Amino acid sequence: MQIANWYFASPWYFLLLLLIPASLIWYLYRGKKVTSAFRFPNLPSVQGRTISLRERITWLPFVLRALGFTALVVALARPQSFSSGENVYTEGIDIALCLDISGSMLAEDFKPNRLDAAKKITQDFIDDRTGDRLGLVIFSRDAFTQCPLTVDYQVLKNLLREVKSGMLEDGTAIGNALANGVNRLKDSKAKSKVLILLTDGVNNAGEIDPLTALEIAKHYNIRIYTIGIGTIGQAPYPFQTPYGIQYQMAPVEIDEALLHQIANGTGAKYYRATGNQKLETIYKEIDKLEKTKVETTSYKSRKEMFYPWAATSAVLIMLELLLSQTYLRRLP
């Protein structure tokens, strides 16, 4: 149960408060029953008598007992406080990161290789975000959501560290990757929705054509920034032999025309990364994307308030007992 800025974990204890009016009725009935009558030979002699302080506050023990009982009931209801929700305006957008993890991403024209370089720079990109929701899609022959949209950047980075080549069957399904990323973003309420696709190959797998995925993205007003990763010409690819890891130079083939078309079709931009530093520069440029104000309500962690209320109850009841046995003690 929540009342204003207070939350009660065990609200059923409040039913005990019904005992207070019952006690009040009993207190008033008992007071009338025990009232003594005195005979005075001369009534006018007592009419001007001053009523003492003790007589004026005979009701105080009952009030203290009722307040102490109320505080005890509140303590048993387990009150928890939290800060008032306040509207916080942050500059934020929703971003889906689509990362190619095909076997060719192990080429070492980047240091230590394309995949590890992309993971490191993507992690730096995540660290620079504040207030944005980010998600991660990995793809090879198929596409898989490694992390849905979240503002828990630590979880996202942990899942990014677990990414490695071989998690999916080899291939390059650009259309599937785009469709998966669009699916992450299509229900977003943010005014700015961005997908960043990083790949080093040519679309050669998947059930969804990249241009079909492009049209879906345009329908949901999603901008797609594309990055082709790989040096110009040839790059050293590692492969396993009976004698250990060997390297073979292979041509770098990136479908730049398709990546250009996808980016331009959504009002975004295509980039070509030919080295670690260039890739880092690209992400920094994307980091300057136009922001949109998002209103969020933030609450601090709940704080248990049992002990303050229990202590208040103990103090009130002890004070009531003290007064009842001393200054306000009833005469036999």
Image (cartoon, rainbow, N blue to C red):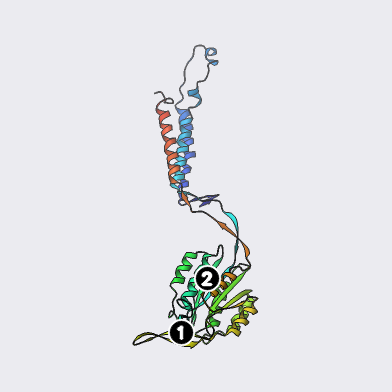
Residue 241 image offset from top left, x and y in percent: 36, 87
At label 2, the amino acid type is: Gly
Label pair 2/1, CB-CB below 8 angstroms: no
Which residue is the site of mark 2?
135
Q: Residue at x 53, y 18 (%)?
A: 50
Q: Give whichever of discs 2 and 1 has the lower sequence position.
A: 2
Quarter placement of the C terminus: top left
**Could you tell whether 265 is left or right of 13 in the image?**
right
Q: Residue at x 47, y 18 (%)?
A: 38
Residue 138 image offset from top left, x and y in percent: 49, 77
At label 1, the amino acid type is: Pro
Disc sitting over residue 256 in the figure: none
**Could you tell whether 325 is left or right of 110 in the image?**
left
Choose between 155 and 110: the one closer to the eye: 110
Give the Cα distance between marks 2 and 1. Answer: 31 Å
Q: Is residue 60 above or below residue 201?
A: above
Q: Residue at x 45, y 42 (%)?
A: 308
